[in-house]
Amino acid sequence: MVEQIIQDIKQQGWSYLEGVLDASFLSTLSILYADNFVPAMVGKASERQRMEEIRGDLTFWLDPLNPPSQLRELIHLLNELKQHLNQHLYLGLKDFECHLAKYPIGSFYKKHLDRFETNASRSLSFIFYLHEEWNDKDGGELILYNQKHEIIKKILPKPGSFIIFLSEEFPHEVKPCFRERRSLTGWMHTKILN
Ligand code: OGA
Ligand code: MN
């Protein structure tokens, strides 16, 4: 898995892998989706606000040093991935942050970049899809664009799949979902977060 990710990022700046998490693992996570989620916000610190016409997901931020027990192994895997990426791609990654996200039926996230002034240390964006079922008709595709805003990849969020991409280079959007869409989304940073 790691070799493929490194090779893909070197060649094209992103990597998408299916079947990274298995169904039995995904079935242990539904309890995490019972509560504690808050509406995601858009905008910079002082101007943060809810704008459902931009993004309609709900998030639950995780403490990577003290994650829910079900996610401990996955967080460990992310730490190892960070080290491998540093060894092979010299990205100088120091830390990562992540949240669980859920997109209620009908919600979406309009085209955006994950890296902007207030998030200048975001280097890589990654997402694991955690719902247990997803079909073509459920929508919710992740659309990746290049810097000319041409579509380069449409990803149906298959359960257990994984995507990672350079935060600065790929505008992306989440199409409207017709089933509750669940993920763990995070960012690897070139500085230590506090
Ligand atoms: C994000 C995002 C994409 C996805 O949370 O910034 O773009 O596929 N998520 O969930
Ligand atoms: Mn994003």
Image: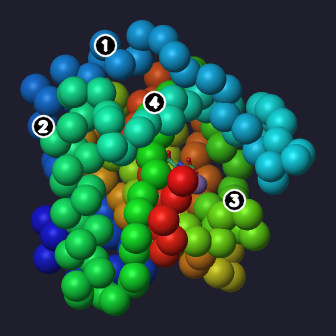
Residue bearing the label numbered 4: 181
Please, what secondary structure does the residue beneath circle 3 have?
A: strand
Where ligand 2 lies, by image quadrant? bottom right
Circles 3, 4 touching at the beta carbon (< 8 Å): no
- State whether label 4 is within 8 Å of ligand 1: yes
| Residue 31 marker | 1
Q: Amino acid at mark 3?
A: His
Residue at image point 83% right, 36% down: 49
Please, what secondary structure does the residue beneath circle 4 have?
A: strand
**How far from the left and from the top, in percent, is residue 156?**
40, 47
Q: Which tag, 4 or 2, sits closer to the chain's start?
A: 2
Q: Nearer the viewer, residue 176 or 99?
A: 99
Q: Residues within 10 Å of mark 1 (few under 14, many from 20)?
A: few
Q: Nearer the viewer, residue 61 or 171?
A: 61
**How far from the left and from the top, in percent, is residue 81?**
23, 65
Spatial CA span between label 3 and label 4: 19 Å
Spatial CA span between label 3 and label 1: 30 Å
Q: Amino acid at mark 2?
A: Asp
Q: Which tag, 2 or 3, sits closer to the chain's start?
A: 2
Query: Marks 1 and 2: which is nearer the front?
Result: 1
Residue at image point 66% right, 43% down: 109
Q: Nearer the viewer, residue 127 or 143?
A: 127
> Residue 74 sits in which quadrant?
top left
Q: Which tag, 1 or 4, sits closer to the chain's start?
A: 1
Q: Residues within 10 Å of mark 3 (few under 14, many from 20)?
A: some
